[in-house]
Amino acid sequence: MKDANFTNHFLIAMPNMTDPNFAGALTYICDHNPDGALGVVVNRPTKMFLDTLFEQIGIKVENEALAKQPAYFGGPVQVERGFVLHQPVGNWNSTLPVNDRIGLTTSKDILEATGHGEGPEQIIVALGYAGWGPGQLEAEIKQNAWLSVSADPAVIFGLPPQERLAAAMLLLGVDPAMLSEEAGHA
């Protein structure tokens, strides 16, 4: 696992996950390198809608469907800051390209364009992110805190949030009902 790279993977929280920030979470890993990992939880909508969030930062939302999309809890780090997971990558001021199809942007220009109907085709606006220090994610995976699987953008952008965790498990061929809260090693 020393050279493992979980960029563009889902992390599926195991049933024994005790951290309330991640219990039942599906996290999309946007960057993983020797310095650590950064991801966004993609199945935790908040009660705040994007029209309210955009209004707080002075952006008018012209698309009613977008206005009623929820903001997401992206993770416990920097919850006061917005992180936009989007497809396609585009050309924004501050974007981390996860791959050739998905980007993570932290600059306001993407929100302004989105509010005017000129942003990416598909977005999730998250407040906060999930972060791991060097070797921390690998250690948690070894301790059976997470399952990982290559991500499918259709799970993130094509399914309602409450269906995303089970869909990610199915990518592994795992029936969610079959997961045990007890960790084991073969």
Image: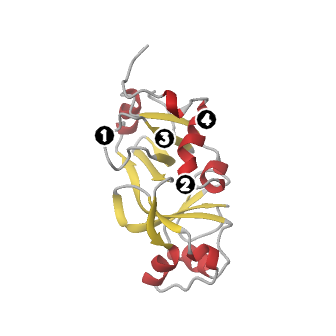
Nearest to N terminus: mark 3 or mark 1: 3
The residue tagged 4 is: 170
Looking at the image, residue 69 lies above or below residue 23:
below
Q: What residue do we see at 31% from left, 40% from top? A: 18
Amino acid under label 4? Leu
- What is the spatial separation of the Cα atoms under label 3 and label 2, in whole angstroms? 15 Å
- Is 62 or 38 nearer to us in this picture? 62
Nearest to N terminus: mark 2 or mark 1: 1
Amino acid under label 1? Thr
Nearest to N terminus: mark 4 or mark 1: 1
Nearest to N terminus: mark 3 or mark 4: 3
**What element does badge 3 sit on?**
strand
Q: What residue do we see at 67% from left, 53% from top? A: 100
Q: Which mark is residue 18?
A: 1
Q: What residue do we see at 34% from left, 44% from top? A: 133
Looking at the image, residue 176 lies above or below residue 72:
above
Q: Percent x, y for residue 13?
A: 43, 39
- Is 162 or 39 nearer to us in this picture? 162
- What is the spatial separation of the Cα atoms under label 3 and label 1, in whole angstroms? 15 Å
Q: Percent x, y for residue 60?
A: 55, 86
**What element does badge 4 sit on?**
helix
Quarter assignment of residue 116: bottom right
Closest to the camera, between mark 3 and mark 2, is: 2
- Is 95 or 149 nearer to us in this picture? 149
Q: Which mark is residue 161?
A: 2
**Residue at the extreme top:** 186
- Image marks 3 and 1: residues in contact by CB distance under 8 Å: no
